[in-house]
Image (cartoon, helix red, strand yellow):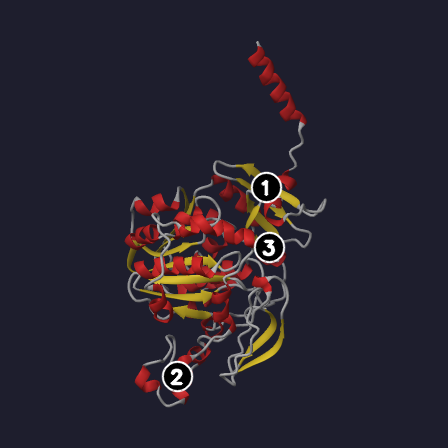
């Protein structure tokens, strides 16, 4: 009798309590602030099997999807307007938020394997990574691996910007842990792109270990490529280097690219990776998706290059890698998030890029050093933009003047904010290509 009465009391209490979905997904544990009343319009809420997933619209019209209150992906209003057929004036992509990451990370990965036929994306998020890759008409199949079913449902809040993962007959979802999905085998994959949640989220660090990268290597077809998203905000240099060390131990060749103000993409190959084929940005489906921004030129995309296996390989040889047995991220990533630290050392690759081949060429030593950058002959638009800063607006953007080369001209610079936001700038002009893809 007492047990039945307890059930009645608890049930009645639950019915009386008003569980505010806005408050439950506010992420107050991260920001320390509650959203203002009416600041969010809830579009989706579900307590899933592994996380509470929410999606909301901000006062400016952006759509954000969250897991346990932490934003995992977002899109500005203009993407939804453009996809809905509205006439949107083309403006440069923004280096703030997730806009450029969701575009450039899958696009740069695809450019390194433009002949990909079978692909996989780890993590649904907004669905924009799968959306962009499915814009390639030559891709025959794409599987999106997602462990949380509610994330797939929640990502429908981004419609009509992301229809292909849901409607394209080449696409399917696999509700599975990514490690198990890679380990269980299947058809060889030409391209794998991994964009999970932040590694300080419980369980996610296992997708940044040597053992996971070995699983991916086993699934890749000959000539296959792997794209790994890594964030530099709320992170420390030694932790990012532990991830790079794991990739360096597993893959014979890799390169790193700037995809937002504080995010990088590492592209690794089962064999030496080829020069990127930037013509993928002109494929009809991808070009249509990117119609709200100026055209992404080869020179602009090449300028996002940061460093590669040859640049950091000697350093990483002695650096401890993140492994299942030595889970450095598992132990330290949450501390880095709490401290609000940024990977300051790695940020300087964007601050102080050095085009060594060009310097050697001017000294008359290029022929002896074999320093022509991949993607073009000396003096070409592609070659001349390698390793030079791109136009960015937002955190960790280039602000220091690069005086080694007259072709780079700083226009405006300012410093503000906590450590990972100090490198704020207005604009860098790259001459003669002058790429302005991010502003």
Q: Nearer the viewer, residue 395 or 438?
A: 395
Residue at 33%, 66% in the rendered image: 273
Q: Nearer the viewer, residue 281 or 353?
A: 353
Q: Secondary structure at mark 2?
A: loop
Q: What is the distance, in whole Å, between disc 1 and disc 3 at their CAs? A: 17 Å
Q: What is the distance, in whole Å, between disc 1 and disc 2 at their CAs? A: 52 Å
Say few, some or many: other residues with alpha carbon within 10 Å of mark 1 (under 14 / 14 to 19 / 20 or more): many
Give the foreground label among 1 and 2: 2
Give the foreground label among 1 and 3: 1
- Toward the bottom, the furthest residue is 364
Asked if residue 183 can be seen in this view, the reply is: yes
Say few, some or many: other residues with alpha carbon within 10 Å of mark 3 (under 14 / 14 to 19 / 20 or more): many
Left/right of residue 427 with respect to residue 149 in the rendered view: right
Q: Label 1, on which residue?
A: 44
Where residue 153 sits in the image (x, y, percent)? 52, 42
Task: State which quadrant residue 154 falls in.
Answer: top right
Q: Nearer the viewer, residue 121 or 235?
A: 235
Where residue 406 sits in the image (x, y, percent)? 52, 85
Q: Label 2, on which residue?
A: 378
Res. 296 mark: none
Left/right of residue 57 with respect to residue 254 in the rendered view: right
Res. 80 mark: 3
Q: Secondary structure at mark 3?
A: helix
Say few, some or many: other residues with alpha carbon within 10 Å of mark 2 (under 14 / 14 to 19 / 20 or more): some
Please tell me which of labels 1 and 3 falls first in the chain: 1
Q: Secondary structure at mark 1?
A: strand
Please tell me which of labels 2 and 3 falls first in the chain: 3
Q: What is the distance, in whole Å, between disc 2 and disc 3 at their CAs? A: 41 Å
């Amino acid at each position: 009798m007492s047990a039945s009465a307890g059930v009645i009391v608890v049930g009645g209490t639950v019915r009386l309590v008003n569980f505010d979905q806005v408050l439950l997904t506010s992420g107050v544990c991260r920001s320390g602030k509650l959203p203002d009343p009416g600041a969010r319009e809830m579009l989706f809420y579900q307590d899933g099997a592994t996380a509470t997933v929410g999606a909301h619209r901000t006062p400016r019209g952006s759509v954000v999807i969250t897991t346990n209150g932490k934003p995992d992906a977002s899109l500005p209003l203009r993407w939804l307007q453009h996809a809905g057929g509205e006439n949107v004036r083309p403006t440069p992509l923004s280096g703030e938020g997730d806009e450029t990451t969701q575009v450039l990370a899958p696009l740069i990965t695809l450019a390194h394997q433009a002949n990909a036929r079978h692909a996989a994306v780890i993590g649904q998020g907004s669905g924009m990574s799968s959306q962009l890759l499915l814009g390639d008409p030559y891709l025959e199949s794409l599987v999106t691996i997602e462990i949380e079913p509610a994330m797939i449902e929640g990502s429908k809040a981004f419609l009509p910007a992301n229809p292909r993962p849901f409607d394209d007959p080449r696409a399917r979802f696999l509700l599975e842990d990514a490690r198990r999905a890679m380990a269980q085998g299947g058809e060889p994959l030409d391209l794998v792109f991994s964009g999970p949640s932040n590694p300080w989220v419980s369980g996610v660090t296992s997708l940044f270990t040597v053992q996971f990268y070995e699983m991916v290597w086993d699934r890749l077809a000959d000539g296959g490529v792997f794209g790994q998203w890594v964030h530099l905000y709320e992170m420390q240099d030694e932790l990012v280097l532990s991830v790079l060390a794991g990739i360096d131990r597993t893959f014979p060749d890799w390169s790193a690219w700037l995809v937002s103000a504080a995010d990088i993409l590492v592209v690794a190959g089962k064999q030496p990776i080829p020069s990127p084929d930037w013509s993928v940005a002109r494929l009809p489906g991808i070009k249509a998706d990117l119609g709200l921004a100026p055209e992404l030129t080869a020179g602009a995309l090449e300028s996002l290059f940061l460093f590669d296996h040859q640049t950091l390989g000697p350093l990483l040889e002695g650096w401890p890698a993140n492994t299942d047995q030595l889970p450095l991220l598992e132990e330290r990533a949450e501390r880095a998030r709490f401290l609000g630290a940024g990977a300051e050392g790695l940020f300087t690759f964007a601050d102080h890029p050095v085009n060594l081949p060009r310097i050697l060429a001017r000294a008359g030593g290029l022929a002896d050093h074999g320093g022509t950058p991949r993607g073009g002959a000396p003096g070409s638009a592609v070659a001349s933009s390698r390793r030079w800063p791109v136009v960015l607006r937002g955190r960790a953007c280039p602000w220091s003047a690069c005086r080694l080369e007259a072709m780079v001209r700083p226009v405006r610079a300012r410093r503000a904010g906590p450590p990972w936001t100090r490198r704020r700038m207005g604009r860098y002009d790259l001459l003669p290509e002058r790429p302005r893809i991010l502003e």
